[in-house]
Image (cartoon, rainbow, N blue to C red):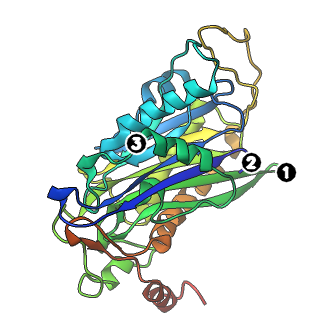
Amino acid sequence: MRGVRVGHTTLIEGDGPTEVGGAVRTGVTVIIPRTEPMWLRPAFAGSHRLNGNGEMTGLEWVRQSGMLTSLIGLTNTHSVGVVRDALIAWEASQRDRGEVFWRLPVVAETYDGVLSDINGQHVHPEHVVSAIESASGGRVLEGNVGSGTGMICHGFKGGIGTASRLVHVAGSTFTVGVLVQANHGSRKRLSVLGVPIGEAISEREVPLAGPVLPEGAGSIIGVVATDAPMIPTQLDAMAQRVGLGVARNGGLGEHTSGDLFFAFSSANETLTACDVKDLGPLASTIEVISLTYIDPFYEAVVEATEEAIVNAMVAADTMTGRDGITVHRLPHGRLSELMKERSRFH
């Protein structure tokens, strides 16, 4: 999608028991919604909570203002504060020295402590800067990368996954993209296009990571980006539809799962922020998609979310982390075989 960029910093170091530092299997991912600085050209945004056993900072301001004024950071549960502060420090480095401003960055997390020494807090400010500087458009790296490095999905290795759809309405074409940090779900409930993959691939065939956490524990973060002009209430609804894509793969929003979703529109590029030194224009003219045409966008979110979760597992590789714990990849051959058996592919 034009103007939207994603960058990763992947941290894979060491091994061994946690009590001596253990293995580092973590990282940070940064989403940059616009080419122009977000503090000058914010984007309309919305959010949704399927289950709240997780964290996404900055949402109170997004809910009140309807605007995203920062980059979006993703990381592990115990590094949220570091990433949040690093985004503020990076913005300060890009602005006039001594300029007075305030910022409430959006930073979300999922727990990678099964594979990584999460209490070591190995994500540092320089890793956030590296992710920003490496950000690019086009195809996004998936699987064991960035903030998805140590994640587990439906009992298989998870991580970062993406997918997109084109929406054709009233003679115009728009893009809807979804990025997930997939760290949720139980093996037995995994379904792909309605095929019960998790039931067919038992833990006898592909072992689970063991009783470190209850099966189904974990979280998923979903970020929706679209170039369709939408206002915050519409983007709240777009974020809400991520939950339907999660459900299609067998996710329940379990009690121990933090399922938090965010959506933004890169359209309406003339929006201006209101900082201390600049009150901005008296009024702005915006475009907005008519609700008559909204349903195809909802469908795009659901389909892209479902695919992004599968892509996260397909792109991931088997990983051994702290204390010798191993999480296996989703076996591609078995997946293809099961899909063919159910006549989904020919």
Question: 62 or 145, which lies in front?
Answer: 145
Q: Is residue 268 above or below residue 73?
A: above
SS of the residue under disc 2 = loop
**Residue drawn at (37%, 70%), measured in percent from left and top?**
157
Front residue (pair 280, 79): 79
The spot of residue 108 in percent (x, y) is: 41, 42
Residue 292's x, y, as percent? Answer: 70, 42
Q: Which residue is identified by label 3?
A: 124
* Image position of 3 (left or right of 145): right
Counting residues from the start of the chain, the first of labels 1 and 3 encountered is 3
Q: Quadrant of the C terminus?
A: bottom right
The residue at which mark 1 appears reads as 171
x, y percent for residue 291:
67, 39
77 relative to 211, above or below? above
Q: Nearer the viewer, residue 273 or 73?
A: 73
Relative placement, left or right, of 150 versus 10 is left
Task: Check disc 2: other Cα within 10 Å, few if <14, some if 14-19, many if 20+.
Answer: few
Judging by the rendered image, the residue that carries numbered circle 2 is 2
Quarter of the image holding residue 41? top right
Query: Is 308 or 74 nearer to us in this picture?
Result: 74
In this view, 25 is above or below 61: below
